[in-house]
Amino acid sequence: MEDNMKKIGESLSNFQAALIQNGMSIQEFINETYSKKWLSDEMVSIMEIRTSLVNSMNQFLVNEGLINIERVMLSILTDPLAHDIEHTPVIKYKGHTYVTTHSMIYNKFLACSNPNIKGVFIDSPNIRLELESPNNIQRGRYLVDFSQMDLELRRNRNLTIDDYYSKESMVSDILNEDINKIKNFFERMIVFAVEEINKRNKEHLKNLNVVLEVPKLPFPSFYKDEAMAKHGSKNYEIKIGEESKSQFFWLMGLKRENYDLIYPYLLKDGSKIDSMKISSKNIFNYDMLSKSINAKTGKHSDAIEILSGAIREWLYDPIVQRIIDNKVLSVKPVIKNNNIENIEELGGYGPFLYFVSMKDQKGRNIFPDTMGGGIGIERTLYSILKGDKVKKIDDITYFGKNPDSHPLYLF
């Protein structure tokens, strides 16, 4: 502890010396970066709106019959994500190595195993050490640590691997039914939250010079490959946002994480579907995007993603193959005599994949078929409040750690 405090003190000393060299004192830095924000009327309005957002989502999920589970901040396995990050923070404890939580995606799956629950939710913690902007451009929406309302629902379809291989039309119809159900679930949650914010926070919205419109159901939906064909590979999210009159809308079918369902993927003869034949309509995932509306001009801001989710891969063989194809692992588990012979090669995935392989006494899968997603709290606030008063995501946090803002986070 003493050594750690000494290192922190040395970092602060070097930081203060750099400030002085650039003509600024530590007092000026604290005032400009923190205290002016903390003492502002705008921060009071933002946090009042945050309170309404979080409380209303909690209330909606309770009303819908989901159960709240505990946060998990340390594990041998956390969501590795498909995008680049600087590194995964690790903590040594009692002779073992743990990683900090990128997301609780695997925890959600496992918590849904019991057939007597409808689903789970958590206001979950996330630590993601994003790479700095390559061009030293201030990006408005990234935070090193943030929270999201994470939820997962059981689908209860009980489709087997034989169904997966042999009943493609039936399985596809069921998946399309379910993706509409989960989109409707999230849409109703957003409507509930927007109505609550408008009821409780009229003056706070006015203070920030934004309006929040109650969206109509269903929200507009756009498929990624169609959006890219129309608008190109750059800024297509902004372009479809300009097309959408709704403040909230969907982007569908993004080839992404290994747990987001692609169907069909594996074929009965052991081969895989030709990757060139995988369209957005074969990828059962979704992003929700939103934008702010200026109260005086009615102008919409550029849209940004606030929620990502999917119907999940639920069968052992496709789960393992997708993990390998996404280059998360290079080998499959070798399970014999109730143990994993190559557990060392699987990193933190060994116990998770063993559970996925397990059957109950009737030979049925224990691992559940689910669908869900996570909505970023800070990202949502930033998207609906940005404008004259909110310029970047730091502005809607007390202690936000934007990787592009400054080299040392004091609080």
Image: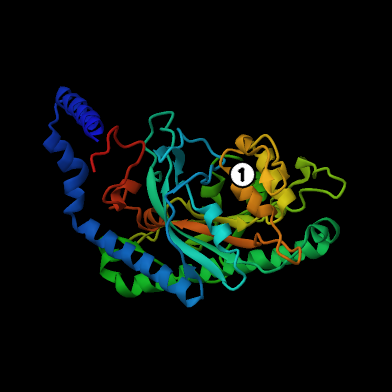
From the viewer's perspective, is residue 120 above or below residue 409? below
From the viewer's perspective, is residue 305 above or below residue 83? below
The quarter of the picture where the C terminus appears is top left
From the viewer's perspective, is residue 251 above or below residue 206? above
Q: Which amino acid does label 1 sit on?
A: Gly
| Residue 33: % across, % down | 21, 42
Find residue 51 and report its image quarter: bottom left
Tally the numbered discs: 1
In the rendered structure, the answer to whether residue 88 lies left or right of residue 378 reads right
- Residue sitting at the far bottom: 63
In the rendered structure, the answer to whether residue 228 lies left or right of residue 42 reads right
The quarter of the picture where the N terminus appears is top left
In the rendered structure, the answer to whether residue 165 lies left or right of residue 142 reads right
Say whether residue 343 is visible. Answer: yes
In the rendered structure, the answer to whether residue 242 lies left or right of residue 263 reads left
- Residue count near mark 1 (Cα–Cα under 10 Å), binned few <14, some 14–19, many ≥20: many
Q: Write the residue at 26% across / 32% down.
A: 4
Q: Write the residue at 40% across / 57% down.
A: 377
